[in-house]
Amino acid sequence: MPPRKKEALLDEALERARDGAEIRLPAGEHRLTRDLTKAVSIAGVGARATRIVLDGRAATSHALSLKDLALVAEETALEVVGSAISLERVNITARGSALFVHGGGAASAWDVRLETPRSGGLELPLVEVRDEQSRVSLTRAVVRGRLGIFAHEGGRVRADECRLRAAQGPCVRAHRAKVELERCTLEGSGAAGVYARARARVFLRACALRGSAFAQVEAHDAFVRVVGGSITGGADDGVDAHEGSRIELESVRLQDNDIGVRVIASRARLRDVVVAGGRGAAVVAEQSALVEIVAGELDAGDAAALEAFDGGVIRATGVRCRNRDGEPVFAYDHGVVEVHPGVPARPVPDADACWEMIEAARSHVAQRRRGGDPDAAIAKRLVEVLAATDIATIVAFDHFVWERMAEAYRWDLWAVAYLMNGGCSDDGFDYFIGWLVGQGRERFTAALRDPERAAEGLGPEQEPFSNEDVLGIGVNAYRRLTGSDQVNDFYAVHRRRVRRKLVGKPFDEETVMAEHPALARFWAGD
């Protein structure tokens, strides 16, 4: 009897499979000739070894998992309608879309490669997500083709640590949709790197955009926020805003573009932005645009650093503006440029300065408090103080707190926290350390020398010894300073990672009381 073809084996396996089944495919080429009408998992032995050739698009309205294989399609590869699909270590080569998600569908992909074949493709994006209930999440993905990612009609896309390249269109196009990119690289776009319009909302965090044929970020009646990262080497402008758009740039470097930031009949806010090496002005406002700039460095070479005309207004505070002829500001045709000196740069606070800030906050609260939680009031006061400084100071204080969190991450202190609070979970121990930091340097350092001194002068009537708010001082001060409600901006771009390792010998809940008789007052009434 001749062996059955592998496409027959795959189709028959899908026919026989029940929902929840796992189908394992060996190395080699397989052919899929039917839609995916069951909730199954299909796993190969590697994207270079197991290859599925699709006979038309594979549509599914059922939960589906694909792992360790490659898909090849002459048109759209996977159409996801109202269901959830997950891809892990999957390569998709498609002349149409690799993923088309709509009808409330969801796709999550890790370590995938989505490509148009070298022979060319159709006029379709590699990833398309459409309608308000549909979403796509990509992590460590490579997306390379004629057109990149297209989100519209309320669709949502999130991409982390991805590399995007689109030869003939934008890497990312958003129409009335939400797109979030974090630590992604967008390069070589045949149009704009990111193109947003029709009330789209786009957030870029710690991303690198380079080499776009048009403006690297272009917005029309849209909101775009870029925090961290760089926008470099474009054939056109770095950022263009049109038709009532709102643009926010923070801690971004724009280099070797035409104009750095062009704002037309729109509004923009820039904070700590650097523009250098451009072929035109650093910032331009026209057609009644309003641009507000705080801090940063704008170097425009032979052009003006700040240029406003046709009713455009630029207000710059604490910004260093330079060009070669020594006249970095140019306003004409009812344009207005206002340049104001900023607050002199503050030295970044060290540990001593941070402890002093905590002591000052404690004194402030002690003098003014009328009831309420004093620990929460201390954290609130520190947020108020830091929000009146700058991002560098906030980041330094946040780092100081997390260094103390790492320093006190010890089993012997956890045992004391367990006794003082009548129990202490993992999160509870973090909040205990936050409380200890908020008590000031003297109690904190004493507790490191002798953990029982954390309880010195205190009794069970003052429980709980917990202050979660201390852990959020940095991010809350940042939100107040910048006016942004995007907490991931702070975590992804500004927070400096502190590694923690729990040290010492774990305590035994059965014997911990006997080992700390000096703390008997905390459980004597039980």
Image: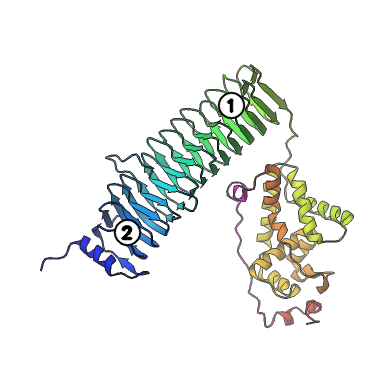
Q: Position of residue 174 (x, y in %)?
A: 48, 41
Q: Position of residue 165 (x, y in %)?
A: 40, 40
Q: Quadrant of the C terminus?
A: bottom right
Q: Position of residue 423 (x, y in %)?
A: 70, 75
Q: Is residue 507 left or right of residue 4?
A: right
Name the N-terminal-most of marks 1 and 2: 2
Q: Position of residue 48 (x, y in %)?
A: 29, 55
Q: Is residue 422 left or right of residue 18?
A: right
Main SS of the magenta part reads loop
Crowding around mark 2 (Cα neighbors within 10 Å: few <14, some 14 to 19, many 20+) is some
The correct choice, above or below, for 186 with respect to 514 in the image is above
What separation in Å lies between label 1 and label 2 (alpha carbons)? 48 Å
Q: Are marks 1 and 2 in contact (CB under 8 Å)?
A: no
The local secondary structure at tag 1 comes to: loop
Q: Residue at x 49, y 53 (%)?
A: 133
Quadrant for residue 325, please give it: top right
